[in-house]
Image: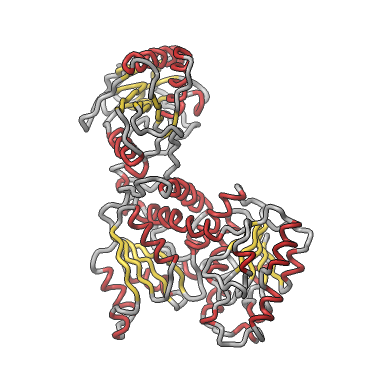
Amino acid sequence: MTCPDLSAPNPTSSTPADARDVMSADDIARALRRIGHEILERNKGAEGLVLLGIPSRGVPLARRLAAAISEVEGTQIPVGELDITLHRDDLRRHPVRAAHRSRIPETGIDDRVVVLVDDVLYSGRTIRAALDALSELGRPRAVRLAVLVDRGHRELPIRADHVGKNLPTSRDERIHVRLAELDGLDVVRISGGEAR
Amino acid sequence: MTRHLISSADLSRQDIEDILATAASMHDLQRREVKKVPTLRGRTVINFFFEDSTRTRSSFEIAGKWMSADTINLSAKGSSTSKGESLRDTAMTIDAMAVDALVIRHNASGACHQVAQWVRASVINAGDGTHEHPTQALLDAYTLRTRLDDLEGKHVVIVGDLTHSRVFRSNVITLKKLGARVTVVAPPTLMPSGIGTWSETDGFATSWDLDAVLTADEPVDAIMMLRVQKERMSGGYFPTAREYTVGYGLTRERLEALVRRNPGVLVLHPGPMNRGLEIAADAADAPQSVVLDQVSAGVAVRMAVLYHLLAGDDAASGPLTGSAATGALPASGALASALTTMEGGALR
């Protein structure tokens, strides 16, 4: 989730004119490569790893991470996607949007180390919903969290294990993550707030 | 999306697409160990059935429970209705208990539309008289989509007692919105009068001759057999059951001929089936039959409907669907109201 609102991801949406780039395509690629190494280091290898992307932009990020890890370890890492719509705590605050299917790898998640992957960590509510959704699918040995951007302002006691970039923001600002798979280009931009 | 689901015409193409997408994720739940999500926690759904039902009532109950809503079943027998309470008083009494949704089946066409004017809760039509049964049409569309992928340009044949069929009315509206072509077949006595106004709309045809439709050049992607409703059959619509079967039943011979011409054809039936009358046992149990898929889809689709009507922001829902009950297809308003008020009128 780019931000905690429910606006559907829109590949064609353009960022406002005052947006500044904070991560280039190269920065994103380097961050993902580093996170891949961190995950492997923390897990002492690729054994039992399952990566689950949170739609929409967590999904391509999870695939890229899996590819980066496979490159290092030479084994395929199971990748899936976890739709959290039915577990959100803000359903009553927004118009309904369709739920989508979660795709869990055939290996399942029981006794595996699940790494949740999302683009931006903000309030932490998305991750709370993801943890609830996970508990209905099985009992992982451990759950970890990898995000491309941590922008702060947590509302729940949740932290990321692996962060691409810590980005101190004000609440007025918006983070726009654009990924080639969905948007045609790789970039992270920030807009709104006071000009610096 | 509207606050009530009274008629299939209440749903736009996008609404249908959203419900079917959500239903697919709900369907996955049925294969899980924990078949429950917390989405509708704290919401209350009342199933009020003035007519008998097995699959619709149980699937609405299961759907509500798997969404974590509190689900309560009421039937006319054993409620104050049997003491002579009017529909309005019963509906308002239940509404006063601050329930969130009323799922209603009633033998009078338009009952759900009427109740929707009186209550604050969302009203879901689970079959009203000979008018509509929108969730059945959605689950049929879901079942067809699962097997046929896109319904654009697909040809669906609906056969049977059209005059008394709410399933047929909702299906025609929904299937046409999804781009399918629909041919309906019935004996002249069970063809709704005024259906000619529907025939003029694109992708819709009527026929009295089942064999002619099944052997025509146009391929058949699915055939839906409607139940001969014995409880509404006092009017002598056909001489004998045997004669109905010979003319309009899906016999083994008809199915074999149909499969030879259309190897991928699907056989649907909304249930309950009269085996040997409108559908032969061989056809009901044939590999082409998706009758049990329909039942399984029923729970997923009803979960999706409850989700889309109840999960969101109350203030963000649309206004009351005032003209819903008669606002079906552009030309069908007159048909729906004409049909629903007459029993046996098609004999003329």
Measuring from the top left, give residue B258's x and y in whole percent: 72, 61
Res. B1 visible in picture: no
Measuring from the top left, give residue B194's x and y in whole percent: 63, 76
Quadrant in the picture for residue A83: top left
Q: How is the image coloured?
A: secondary structure
Measuring from the top left, give residue A107's x and y in whole percent: 43, 32
Looking at this rendering, what residue extends furthest in the right direction? B217
- Identify the residue at horizontal 66%, vertical 54% (top origin): B154
Res. B104 visible in picture: yes
Quadrant in the picture for residue A141: top left
Image quadrant containing the C terminus of chain A:
top left
**In the image shown, does B113 or B291 lie closer to the viewer?**
B291
**In the image shown, does B47 or B18 lie closer to the viewer?**
B47
Answer left or right for B309 relative to B191.
left
Measuring from the top left, give residue A72's x and y in whole percent: 45, 12
**In the image shown, does B117 or B305 lie closer to the viewer?**
B305
Image quadrant containing the N terminus of chain A:
top left
- Identify the residue at horizontal 53%, vertical 76% (top origin): B337
The vertical placement of B36 against B136, above or below, is above
The vertical placement of B271 against B341, above or below, is above
The vertical placement of A162 against B341, above or below, is above
The vertical placement of B115 against A144, above or below, is below
- Identify the residue at horizontal 48%, vertical 76% (top origin): B129
Total tally of numbered discs in the picture: 0
**In the image shown, does A7 or A19 lie closer to the viewer?**
A7
